[in-house]
Amino acid sequence: MHYQKNPLLSNASVFPFSFYKNNGKNQISVNNKSVKITENHNINLVFHIHNSFLHDSNTNNLTEIVSSNNPHITINIPDVRISLDEVPSEINSNKKTKSELKCEEYGKQFLNTTNVLPLVGTNSNVIQIINQKCKPPNRLVIGGVNTSPGEFPHMVALGRRNTDEIFSFSCGGTLIASEWVLTAAHCTYGAKSPTDARIGVHNIKNNQQGIITTINKTIRHPNFKPPAMYADIALVKLNTVVVFNNDIRPACLYQQYDTAPAQGWVTGWGVTEFNGEKQSDQLQKAFLDIVDNVACAIRHNQSIAIPYGITPSMICAGDSHGGWNKDTCQGDSGGPLQISHPKNICLFQILGITSFGQGCAVVNTPGVYTRVSHYLKWIEDIVWP
């Protein structure tokens, strides 16, 4: 996880933009919201696009964003289609998904409610007392710091043990069931693909913390085709059935397909300096802004990781309100983008999986995460068949 000194943005000016298809004159409305692009003295662009989604169901051609003040600024965004096979049928119904029901089950293990009657007075109303069995997350600091032990109890360190039983960390992951870890597919390739998982660990150099178990098997999403980073999601089955406690708890899966909160936490043991190699011994956290997919697509327009642009199966996040000081970096891959569960202080909901970026904490360039809600059905069919 990388933190960069505050960059200076100056001489910003606002350019009104119009949207066209194939150089035509048909203007595209983006949820009736205005689109503003500000430009600093280095011709870097900052995008402010709220609640927008660019989509044309009748063509696969490119959409151009052209400045009405400066027609020389033109950025192509590939048209994006949603694969309905990936969207659970329960998303737009009142029926709860398997993962949602499982989350409720997890919640009962760590947060109990007791009904009692008042001892005095004539009021016969039942009073509910919440018996908390967990350590709530520390919300006093919102980024760029070490976490507290047990603050993110679903975090998993994936890696390998050498002949001396020394654990070598490679990627992060999220415990979502007693035998299953959610991670990025790109973390499971090559000679350094993980063979072991450490769970309940805060300081990765402390071999006495948490538990370590071997990996039984890894299942990558069939649509993951590197070097492209679409469907960058994998499930790791453990050889040990994990027993939950205060320091080891599963996370829930975020259920909303087409909405996201304004901000979320990222956590990891990754690199803490740009162009550096030293990884953090202690689990780090940062609080990032969720960035609109259209703005994100513009910043990653030339990336070989997304030849077809940012798709709805991705979610972007960055430090857009804090000077782009915080970001995920090398070693944070596979770890979660998460929020506290709104109904249970003991649990988190996983929004995304750390996938890729352009460097670390690069100004105006958010990181890209696999959107977990896009893959609920695939996850559920494997973990809770």
Image: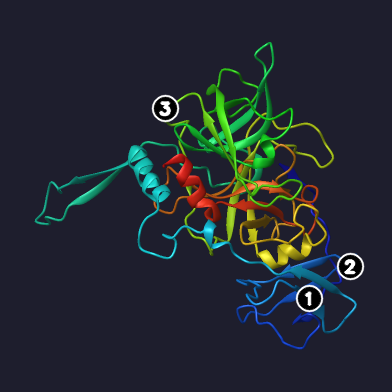
Reading the chain from its start, which is encountered first: label 2 or label 1? 2
Measuring from the top left, give residue 181's x and y in whole percent. 53, 36
| Mark 3 residue crowding within 10 angstroms, few (<14) / some (14–19) / many (20+) | few
**Mark 2 or mark 1: which is in front?**
1
| Mark 2 residue crowding within 10 angstroms, few (<14) / some (14–19) / many (20+) | few
Q: CA distance from mark 2 to mark 1?
A: 19 Å
Reading the chain from its start, which is encountered first: label 3 or label 2? 2
- In the rendered view, does 114 fall on the left or right side of 4? left
| Point 72% across, 66% down: residue | 295
Q: Nearer the viewer, residue 108 or 379?
A: 379
Answer yes or no: do the residues labelled 2 and 1 have beta carbons within 8 Å? no
Q: Quadrant of the N terminus?
A: top right
Circle number at residue 243: 3
Extreme residue in the top direction: 164
Measuring from the top left, give residue 325's x and y in whole percent. 74, 51
**Mark 3 or mark 2: which is in front?**
3
Q: CA distance from mark 3 to mark 1?
A: 52 Å
| Mark 1 residue crowding within 10 angstroms, few (<14) / some (14–19) / many (20+) | some
Reading the chain from its start, which is encountered first: label 3 or label 1? 1
Circle number at residue 43: 2
Q: Amino acid at mark 3?
A: Val
Label 1 residue SS: strand
Tell me if I can see residue 17 in this picture.
Answer: yes
Q: How is the image coloured?
A: rainbow
- In the rendered view, does 331 fall on the left or right side of 290? right
Q: Nearer the viewer, residue 308 or 362?
A: 308
Extreme residue in the bottom direction: 25
Q: Amino acid at mark 2?
A: Ile
Q: Amino acid at mark 1?
A: Glu
Q: Which residue is mark 1?
A: 64
Answer yes or no: do the residues labelled 3 and 1 have beta carbons within 8 Å? no
- In the rendered view, does 63 fall on the left or right side of 266? right
